[in-house]
Amino acid sequence: MWNKKGKGKPSPSTDSLFGHGGTPEGKVQCDTNLRIDGGFTGEIRCSGTLTIGEQGRVHASIIAADVIIAGKVFGDVTAKHSLILTSTGCLHGSAAAGRLSIMEGGILNGLVEMEEPSTPEGANGSVWTAECAANAEDDFQQDGHAS
């Protein structure tokens, strides 16, 4: 693995795991993917994907590229790309994400903030705008249903 000059290629990223049997506390900065299957209290910053396993119980503010919650999270979550709540996932706190998916059975108690996706020029497809929402609201008030 090391060449003759003592310099080697960097090792590929390895995932980190907080397993069962303890509740670490503090700040975690992780440049790889991180999975928590036990408890954790504090603050988490993860450049990769943070996964909270079904038995995971986290009391923390979280900032990560992607977040998958299958356990319980108490705190604010910011996912730069996507936030997924599985059918066993539970989030009590605010959520900010580019994309949000909540599977049937997943629980979210808190505020949600999402970034509006940008639409490239000349792209075909419908875009729901504030004007569309206002028109739908007017239609609903006049007819009792949206058109």
Image (cartoon, grey):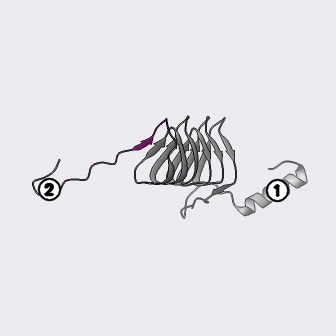
> Secondary structure under badge 2?
loop
Q: Nearer the viewer, residue 53 or 85?
A: 53
Q: Which mark is residue 56?
A: none
> Mark 1: which amino acid?
Glu
- x, y percentage for residue 60? 57, 51
Q: Nearer the viewer, residue 126 or 56?
A: 56
> Secondary structure under badge 1?
helix
Q: Residue at x 82, y 56 (%)?
A: 137
Task: Give the residue pinned by disc 1.
Answer: 137
Toward which corner of the image does residue 132 lie, by quadrant? bottom right
Vertical relation: 82 (above or below) 57: below
Task: Give the residue pinned by disc 2.
Answer: 6
The Cα–Cα distance between marks 2 and 1, rounded to whole angstroms, is 68 Å
> Mark 2: which amino acid?
Gly
- Circle 2 packing at 10 Å, graded few (<14), some (14-19), many (20+), is few
- Circle 1 packing at 10 Å, graded few (<14), some (14-19), many (20+), is some
Q: Main secondary structure of the magenta part?
A: loop
Span colored in magenta: 7-21
14 drawn magenta: yes
- x, y percentage for residue 107? 67, 41
